[in-house]
Image (cartoon, rainbow, N blue to C red):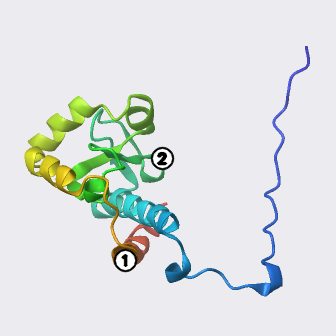
Amino acid sequence: MMRRTWITRKPKPKKPRPDGAPKRELPDMDFWDLVHILDREFSFYVRAGQAASQGHPFVKCSTCDRQDHWKSMDFGHFHQREFFGVRWDLRNGGIQCPTCNRHKEGMKAEMATRLAESGVDLKALQTLKDMWGRTHPSKEDLLRWIREYRAENAKIRKAIKGQD
């Protein structure tokens, strides 16, 4: 039997934009593109923000207490992301390791206990979730939230620049 060796792959070259088209601006993007950008900005804000406030790049999982680099962690939601009223609410979850968040489905019971211990009113969060339901926010709201998180994330990037 032959052993396979790991092959280092070269990154794929970036495709040139047709006709020198400029990069799309935020207002030109559709709703779901903006949602994905906001998810990324929000997750960075929580994970890197906690690392910056602690002064080192390691953060703790809110359900199993495992510590790892903030880039290796997730933001786990207590109520599913499909409920837009609480999707980007800081009270609706915490930093979780990929094992707890993805493989153990967020460990909802443990997360509920930890959120209640930290002073989160779970009934108020449930009410907010039920009030919004799956109603989508407006595109203007998404744009405003993206700009706010990007401004905050710029400060966080400066703070964590020397940590990595």
Classify residue 46 by image quadrant: bottom left
Q: Is residue 77 visible?
A: yes
**Which of the two discs, 2 and 1, labels the residue nearer the N terminus?**
2
- From the image, tell me which residue sits under label 2: 72
Q: 124 left or right of 12?
A: left
**Residue at x 80%, y 69% (from the top left corner):** 15
Q: Position of residue 98 (x, y in %)?
A: 44, 38
Q: Position of residue 64 (x, y in %)?
A: 30, 32
Give above or below for 36 relative to 104: below
**Viewer-proximal residue among 52 and 153:** 153
- For label 1, the crowd category at 10 Å Cα-Cα, with few meaning under 14, some 14 to 19 and many 20 or more, is few
Q: Position of residue 50 (x, y in %)?
A: 30, 58
Give above or below for 16 relative to 57: below
Mark 2 belongs to which amino acid? Answer: Ser
**Residue at x 22%, y 30% (from the top left corner):** 109
Classify residue 148 by image quadrant: bottom left
- From the image, tell me which residue sits under label 1: 155
**Viewer-proximal residue among 69 and 73:** 73
Classify residue 159 by image quadrant: bottom left
